[in-house]
Image (spheres, rainbow, N blue to C red):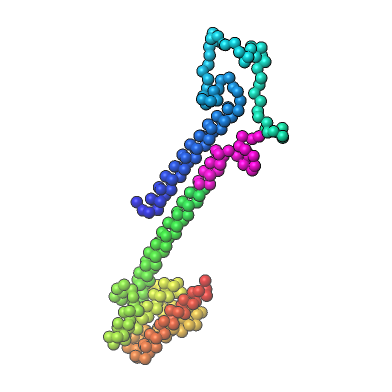
Amino acid sequence: MNLTYRICIYLLTTFFLLVSFAVTAAHAQSNEELSEALKKYDYPWYDAEADQLKPLKSKTEALPMSKERSEIELGKAKKPKPANNPGTGTTTPAGGGGWLGGLNLSTIFMTILVIVIVAVLAFLFYKFLAVESAADEGNSAARRKKLLSESIEQLPFDLQAGNGDFRSMAQQAYQAGDLRRAIIFLYSHVLVTLDQNERITLRKGKTNRQYLKEVWEDPKLSTYFKSVMLPFESAFFGDHDPKPDQFERCWSELDNFHSNLGQSQRGGA
């Protein structure tokens, strides 16, 4: 059970508890308002002091002689009149005066309930979007790793790729004095980096001149690409080791290549 699932269960439990509380409170308030309304009038069937209905008397039961009985028998019983607000001649609302005059507690509780429902749903929707965003980021990271392996598979030659860190492999070969392998690894690093950044489409069977044409519109990238491509072709096809100063120039400009690649991406975004 992940954290998001537990949070959703907790929020839903809290939500239903709030609903139960609001409904119970509204019901209690309705009963209280009913009792208060009944107490305002002198109903013969309601005991205001005990807050309960009076027991019904059968027709055969003799009613005590009283003024009330006489009035009932003579049809002179007075109809209950609502209490008037002194001085205005209008009836005072049960909820009191002011801007809350037309509201009661049950209405307030229902309003609060609606607000709570909206807040809970908004929070759950926010958490859902956050989880989905995290999942998308994870999928993007996995996709980037897959693209790296695909780029390596599309190199025009077979290499012991290891973890795909051709830059480190080129440095190790250079330090060991193997300039031929060093320039091959460096060129592989340049190709894979350009493919990862969607500046070229790395495919088996394509020529170096085709890759050069794809970056030709960017002078800085095309200049560096050509400076590495030419000694690579001499070493790979002609079996000629590059000169130390030639490789060192390519190596020293590698950081600028990465910087120019990042700048061209930002400029095209």
Residue range of the region highlighted in magenta in the rendering: 92-117
- 262 to 126, vertically: above or below: below
Question: What residue is rendered at 41% in x and 48% in y?
Answer: 10
- Of residues 18 and 45, which is closer to you in this image? 45
Residue 185 percent coordinates (x, y): 34, 80
View extreme (front): residue: 66
View extreme (right): residue: 88
Quadrant in which residue 227 is drawn:
bottom left
**136 is within the stretch colored magenta:** no
Question: What residue is rendered at 41% in x and 81% in y?
Answer: 255
**112 is within the stretch colored magenta:** yes
Residue 140 percent coordinates (x, y): 41, 64
- 1 to 202, vertically: above or below: above
- Residue 212 can be seen in this image: no
Residue 239 left/right relative to 264: left
Quadrant in which residue 183 is drawn:
bottom left
Question: What residue is rendered at 37% in x and 80% in y?
Answer: 187
Residue 176 percent coordinates (x, y): 27, 85
